[in-house]
Image (cartoon, rainbow, N blue to C red):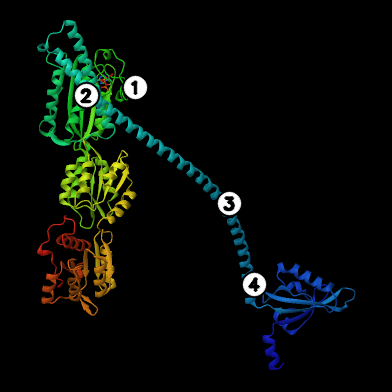
Amino acid sequence: MDALAEAVSTLSRELALVCAADGTITWADARAAALLGLTLGEPLEALAPEDQRPKLRTFLAQAAAGAAGVGSEAWELNLCVKDRPTCFAFRACRLGKEEHGAGHSVLLVGSLVPEDYAHVLEQVNENLSELATLHRQSERQQRELSRRADELLRLNAELAESNQGVRSLHAALDEKAETLQRTAEVKSRVVANVSHEFRTPLHSILGLAKLLLNPSNGSLSQEQEKQVQFIRNSAESLYELVNDLLDLSKAESGKAVLRPRRFQLSEHLSALRGMMRPLLPEGSPVELRVVLPSGEQELELETDEAKLSQVLRNLVSNAAKFTEAGSISVSAERAERDVVLFHVRDTGIGIAPEHHERIFEEFSQVENPLQGKVKGTGLGLALARKLAEVLGGTLTVQSAVGAGSTFTLAIPRVHPEVAEMAGLSERAAKLDPTRAPVLVLEDDRQTLFLYEKYLQRSGFQVVPVRTVDDARAAMQRIRPAAIVLDVMLEGETSWGFLAELKQGESTRDIPVLVVTITDREQKARALGADEFWLKPVEGKKLLSKLSALARVGPVDKVLIIDDDEVHRYLLRQVLRGTPYVLMEAATGPEGVRLAREEAPQLIFLDFVLGEHTAFDVLDDLKADPRTRDIPVILHTSHQLAEHEHARLAKETAAILSKHTLSKEVAIGRIRDALNKAGLGPQQQPPHTSGDREPSRG
Ligand code: ADP
């Protein structure tokens, strides 16, 4: 074999062999012989791995049954090459002549399938089966997902339904609460009015009875005297009832005025002992013991002493009514969290547990043998409990029939509102120069706190006052951006104050928002109110109204003349959220024009403006009577020469360095400048020379 033939044989992947009908190899070409290491006469099957043999047999049988000389499809079959199964693509074709009736021989031509191809095929196979598994999995997941989506849709629908339900429930509840609130208010108002009306004729009856009983006004017959005594006693009972009702309605409507003051516990208790002594005089079968604290136990309280006394008196007088013999003791002790506990113990008839809550209800009395003998309205404990709440505490009872009773009043040593109020007034006294003050005249502390909360993070600062006098005093100190006015105050109205404000030359421009519980819009408007609202006030609404109102008045317009866009931007940011309206000019002439047309209250002027300087602008401004008096704050990063500084100090209200720009400084200077020009609110401290700030360094 020449070299070429050898080379071809090395590269060729083909081999050929012939099998007899029984599958034995009858002929093989040299490559087949060499590659497979076969021996003629051995069955081809012997060369195939066990698992391939049926396939090989089928292939041979099909080829033998086919038409002579027609090539079959290619089959992939494994044969062992040096004991390693190797894949061949075989095509076969029947040979024409039959061998002695033993069937046809078959020619097989095989092509060696490259190993990598086989490997790739295997890989593809593997991947395919993996893909199939994945596909099955993803199908399963898809089904699960769609099931969940359905579930979600259903849940969503259910949720929407429940939401709807909750919302309508809320609306219904809101409505109910409102109705209840209104009813309670009406009730309180009616009770308060009626009680007031009762007191006048009762005064007359009592006075007349006293007059009749006075022997110097002529004597009565014994019978008449007895009758007048009855009238007097009944009138006194009625008077007490009316007073209780009045107190109760006040406490209920939150109108009870808290008058906190500082006092010593021992002094309070000894005063109580003095007041209660006539109830249980010497020799009475019931002894009154008031345990006075001494030394370490002494306490200083800061709360409404009168209300505390009213509660304790009520408890002691009840104890006296329902104790026939034994003792009544009053004591006090300090408990955790700065709470003071007052105990009123008696050795009286006691109260069955099922009545422990009922006795605190209005007009409720417990059936007992003593009830008929004593005076009472069933209002005492209801009032005492309400007062305890007003004091920020609770009133409870421990008792059993026949075992006496102990009433315990627990109140904070310092009334919570004392501390809160102190904080509020303190904060209001310290005016924040970055916020516009809003004077709020409101006698209800809670509402004041609410206003403060509403305006907490706004450009407004609440200056709280609780009486008209306080409001007048505050007006001496500040010029608010707006005023919120409650009309119905404790013991006074603020109609007069509103009229004063709106008639005053210097105050009529301050917007006033009247907020009250009764619809007196016409009157409020007639007196000059800028807005009228019924209580309660909503935070968002208040803020947007105040912002709008504060703009209606004579708003301070501030003009910025600066050729540097970034500096204008910075100044704008610094003055954001303040009540000033800003205008901007990028050149000197533009600034002068705006100053003439818009008449700003103040100008921020940069020193270097392109080809102009602040002096050019100042000259132009001074030359025109319309702009001559507008205060100018020089705002510059330019290092001023001595003579420049001297001249500017004369012609401007302040010189401000851009390096030290901050909200506080800017607003402080604006207010100073406005005050100096007689334009601004008076709340700023007087301008001092130290306020001038050269821009060096
Ligand atoms: P009243 O004007 O009838 O005393 P109160 O509200 O003060 O009204 O008390 C309600 C009821 O509670 C009393 O009528 C009485 O039945 C019961 N009660 C109050 N204090 C005592 C007490 N210390 N011992 C027994 N019963 C009491």
Work out whether residue 36 can be spotted: no
Q: Quadrant of residue 300?
A: top left
Label located before the other in sequence (2 or 3)? 3
Residue 516, given in percent of the width and then of the height, sits at 29, 41
User: At x 27% / y 64%, what residue is drawn?
Assistant: 582
Where is ligand 1, by quadrant? top left
Q: Would you say the beta carbon of the disc 1 residue lies within 8 angstroms of ligand 1?
A: no
What's the distance in space between the residues labelled 2 and 4, CA to CA?
Answer: 113 Å
What's the distance in space between the residues labelled 1 and 4, CA to CA?
Answer: 91 Å
Judge depth for marks 3 and 4 and give the one in front. Answer: 3
Badge 2: residue crowd in 10 Å (few <14, some 14–19, many ≥20)? few
Query: Where residue 354 is drawn, which disc sits there?
Result: 1
Amino acid identity at mark 2:
Thr
Q: Secondary structure at mark 3?
A: helix
Judge depth for marks 2 and 3 and give the one in front. Answer: 2
Q: Which residue is mark 3?
A: 147
Q: Quadrant of residue 628?
A: bottom left
User: At x 25% / y 23%, what residue is drawn?
Assistant: 198
What's the distance in space between the residues labelled 1 and 2, CA to CA?
Answer: 40 Å
Q: Secondary structure at mark 4?
A: helix
Q: Would you say the beta carbon of the disc 2 residue lies within 8 angstroms of ligand 1?
A: no
Query: Where residue 657 is drawn, which disc sits there?
Result: none
Query: Where residue 121 is drawn, which disc sits there?
Result: 4
Q: Which residue is mark 2?
A: 200
Judge depth for marks 1 and 2 and give the one in front. Answer: 2
Marks 1 and 2 close (CB-CB < 8 Å): no
Badge 1: residue crowd in 10 Å (few <14, some 14–19, many ≥20)? few
Amino acid identity at mark 3:
Arg
